[in-house]
Amino acid sequence: MLPKSLRPLFPYLKKYRLSFAVGMICVLCNNGVWILFPQVIRRAVDDLHVGVTRHKLWIYALLLLAVAAIKGIFQFLTRWIMIGISREIEFDMRNDLFQHLERLSYSYYQRIRTGDIMARATNDLNAVRMLLGPAIMYSANTIVFTIGALAFMLSISPRLTFYAFLPLPVISIVVQYFGRRIHERFERIQAMFSEISARAQENFSGARVVRAYVQEEAEIAAFETSNKEYIARSLKLVRLMGMLWPTLETMLGFAIVLVLWVGGREVVNGQLTVQLLSYLRTKTTISLPGAMSIGDFVAFNTYMVQLTWPIIALGWVINIFQRGTASMARINEILTEKPEIEDTPAIKAAGAPTTHLRGDIEFRGLNFAYNGTPVLHDVNLYVPAGSSLAIVGPTGSGKTTLVSLIPRIYEAAPGTVLIDGRPIREYPLEFLRHQIGFVPQETFLFSETVRENIAFGNVDASDEQVRSAAQAASIAADIESFPEQYQTLVGERGITLSGGQKQRTAIARAIIRDPRILVLDDALSSVDTHTEDKILNHLREVMRDRTTIFISHRVSTVRNADMIAVLHGGRIVELGTHDQLLTLNGYYSDLYNKQLLEEELAEV
């Protein structure tokens, strides 16, 4: 029965049950042959004690070589199969973990640091692989060989066997004590490794900020402190392991000394001498009750020596098992995390609609709170298909939250957000998001080429489609000025591009999908007014016959929209066209006058 923390491994073990069965057969054959090794020595010692001949030497030498060769073959097969299975399960688990992470909601990544996730997907997964491979293999070898050796040892001398296994209760107590402490210490080590990974990841991603504020030495010192703590925790585990193995070896050594003492006394007491004298008189060996031949004694001690590695391996297996158990618990924390936003079984069963969306969007009595904090209040808004809506308002008024509810990045209350007259929850997530081109406020580009970034949402896009999208976003001229043009690597998070180039690349990425709904969340904030005009002129053609919602702080960006909504304190306080809002002398009018004054001052 698997421990609770290891139960998620059962489907993987079940998948490879036939391979495990073959591996266990190889384990049985490997140990079955190795158990015969002392028996060959036993026969050889007793037979050669009677008389040494070249024929006998050849026979026993060949038998020992045959046993070693056969054992080597099955040992290779055991390792190849069992370790291979652990690699296959690691492959499956890594894929399943990545697939699960891809499906988790955006809010999960706001709570959990990236470095922590990376540590669990690498270091912890490796510890689980060790549990499924070497730990299972060595455990099986230890159990099978110990059972087989015990049977032969009992047949030779039950009394010596009793002395040989006398330390076993003490060993079980030691194993239980050390196992519990190893588990606890390894959990603390992995938690610290996650901390180090998260700190390193944040420093690499924020390298510009660190340098801009001249915090290199401070960050190095902070990392060194975390690293020292990680080393300190690791050394505590090393010290614990350093105590476990010598303790097990001492118990085994005590048993070997006891066997040599008791068995040696039997030899000294003359039991073997009586057999020898009887043989000289009658040419036959007399078997005395409880007596051992020299071959028996040598075979028994050979079994004791052979048990040395399984006992030592037991300590190693305990270490691997406790590490793997702690790591599997950490991985399972991710696997048991449920997406906050997903399709209901009924929606999955119904499948995606066969037609595209028209693009009507309606917010009906919408209220939304994030982490218990109200963000939007009683929002009622209708955007007809093919029209454009601009949203303006001060920072923190809920603009980004409002547009994020359309592709269900955040989940609105049922029936408060509708597309084409249907609540968005009635559309499958994949279908809904395929119909929406979303350019977020924080531009993110992958560490790939410009072309791959533009074609991210449409991997089958032709070169001409990529170029057309780039032209619509007014980035084509910049790209074609690069030495490698569309094959230019943009670096991590697009670090080799300027802020405006990244934003325009992200716009091209949204356009190439030919979405029915286009959402631009302050997507022109990093470009100058001249470039903005060029992009807007290109976008007017793109926006034709599709619903477009864009957020901006610039009146020049929003003035030509079919409808402008002013959001303040989570409420729509003004709604109308550019000219209508100017007559209200409210927030929009003030914003327009301020920007007009700024432009005049800039000209002066």
Image (cartoon, rainbow, N blue to C red):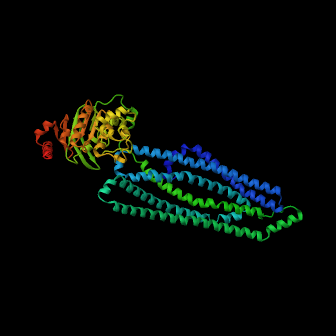
Q: Position of residue 243 (x, y in %)?
A: 54, 66
Rendered image quadrant of residue 401: top left
- Which residue reaches farthest right? 281
Q: With 455 as the anchor, is 599 left or right in this view?
A: left
Rendered image quadrant of residue 517: top left
Asked if residue 355 shows in the view, the reply is: yes
Relative to 441, does residue 225 appear above or below in the rendering? below
Q: Position of residue 268 (x, y in %)?
A: 77, 71
Residue toward you, 576 or 321: 576
Q: Position of residue 117 (x, y in %)?
A: 41, 51
Identified at 74% across, 70% down, the residue is 265
Asked if residue 1 shows in the view, the reply is: no
Relative to 419, does residue 28 appear above or below in the rendering? below
Q: With 509 as the anchor, is 312 left or right in this view?
A: right
Q: Position of residue 289 (x, y in %)?
A: 79, 64
Relative to 174, does residue 548 appear above or below in the rendering? above
Residue toward you, 139 or 56: 56
Identified at 46% across, 51% down, the residue is 122
- Which residue reaches farthest top? 355
Q: With 383 as the anchor, is 221 left or right in this view?
A: right
How many circles with numbers are drawn on the protein? Answer: 0
